[in-house]
Structure formats: C-alpha cells, structure tokens
Amino acid sequence: MEYAADKGLGTIIMEPLRGGCLTNNIPGDIQKLWNESKVKRSLAEWGLRFLWDQSNINMVLSGMNTMDQVRENIKIAEEGYPQSLTNAEKDLIRSVRDAYSSRIHVDCTSCNYCMPCPAGVNIPLNLSLLNDVYIYENLDKPSGNYFHLSARKMSAAYCTECGECEEKCTQNISIKKYLKETANIFEK
C-alpha cells in the first residue's frame, strides 16, 4: 500500500472481513479480547475502522447481504478516517491479529515454489483452507471452496505423494503430511 501511495496510485481493499470469517463464529479466546474492550463495536466496525484508519486506503469493497449491513457499512465509512483509532484500540487490534496468527497451522506463504503439482493439486489453496479450519474453527466456509477444488481435480485428495513439492518448498513444509490432513478433514 505504501508503494502504491508513493506512486500516486489508489488502493482498493476487497473482502476486508474475509468473507465474514472475521465477524462470524469467532473463537472464544478471540471473542474474549473483543469483549474486554472499553469501546463496544460490532466486529464489522472494528475491521472496517482498522482499514479506514490507514491513510493509504482509498476504497473498501465489503460484501453485504442485508440492508442493515449496507447501513452499518455506510455509517462506518462516514465516521472512519485516517488516524481515528486510539493507541489502545490499535493495541487491541494487534492483540486480536496476534491471536489469529498463533492459530496458523501451516506456515505456507503461498509463494507457489511448490507449483505446479504433477497431479494438478493446488497446494497453496489447499493449505490455506486447512489453515482456515484452525484459525476460524469453522468447516462450513472453507468446505465449499474445497469441494470446488475437488470438482476441478485440484483438491488434496488428488495428491499422489510424489514429493516433488517438498523438494521445491523453500520453507521445508511437510506438504504431503498437510495435504493428507486436509483431505482427511474435508473428505469425511
């Protein structure tokens, strides 16, 4: 974002609430952090205010399903402006970020060095879906994405365990093990 701003380019944020993952079915330890805040806001407001607090963001595209969500997003956008969060609020957001980060199961950065897979498996996306299970404690959202991959023969179940991906992985991830775990979770 800083690079784009330095070049005079606008920045647009899409899916700022991760398709609802940051506002629905919140793990207990993370909900506890939000509950301890003196300032009470909806989770959507916390997420959107975090973005509007940054001067390098020009537009936020947030999916909405109800008229109440449209109204809430408009209100947040009207009240959100750069540097509007207090230091305590920023600390809270960092604590929540750290709590989510601590739930990451596979340290895959989606660099794609493991690709292409000879069997056609989309390794980074499968590992991302596995992480979603651990981060959000929610199988419902990622399972739809997994079955989309499965229909295209790109899901973890198609892994032949050839090991080519592990030889190319610069992060030394046990990809075969994690793909097997992904298939076990989603192929139930």
Image: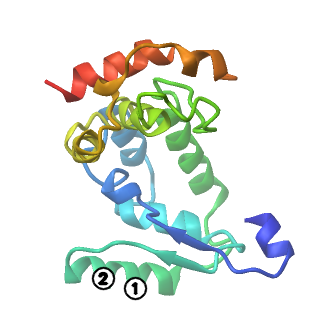
Badge 1 marks a residue whose secondary structure is helix
Left or right of 29 on screen, residue 84: right
Which quarter of the picture shows residue 39? bottom left
Instruction: Residue type at mark 1: give it.
Output: Ile
**Residue pictured at 49% horizontal, 42% vertical:** 96
Q: Position of residue 126 (x, y in %)?
A: 39, 34
**Residue pictured at 56% horizontal, 34% vertical:** 115
Nearer-the-camera pick, 101 or 7? 7
User: In 3D space, how far apart are the residues under numbered discs 1 and 2 (Cα atoms)?
Assistant: 6 Å
Q: Position of residue 165 (x, y in %)?
A: 56, 22
- Numbered mark located on residue 8 in the image: none
Q: Identify residue for label 2.
A: 70
Nearer-the-camera pick, 133 or 68? 133
Nearer-the-camera pick, 28 or 89? 28
- Note whether residue 29 is visible: yes
Tell me: residue 70, above or below residue 158: below
Q: Residues within 10 Å of mark 2 (few under 14, many from 20)?
A: some
Nearer-the-camera pick, 14 or 48? 14
**Residue pictured at 56% horizontal, 30% vertical:** 108
Q: Position of residue 66 (x, y in %)?
A: 20, 77
Tell me: residue 39, above or below residue 70: above
Q: Residues within 10 Å of mark 1 (few under 14, many from 20)?
A: few
Q: Residue furthest front?
A: 118
**Residue pictured at 75% horizontal, 80% vertical:** 9
Which quarter of the picture shows residue 111? top right
Instruction: Quarter of the image for the N terminus: give it.
Output: bottom right
- Note whether residue 41 is visible: no
Disc 1 + disc 2, Cβ < 8 Å = yes
Q: Identify residue for label 1.
A: 74
Q: Position of residue 140 (x, y in %)?
A: 19, 43
Instruction: Residue type at mark 2: give it.
Output: Val
Left or right of 95 on screen, residue 139: left
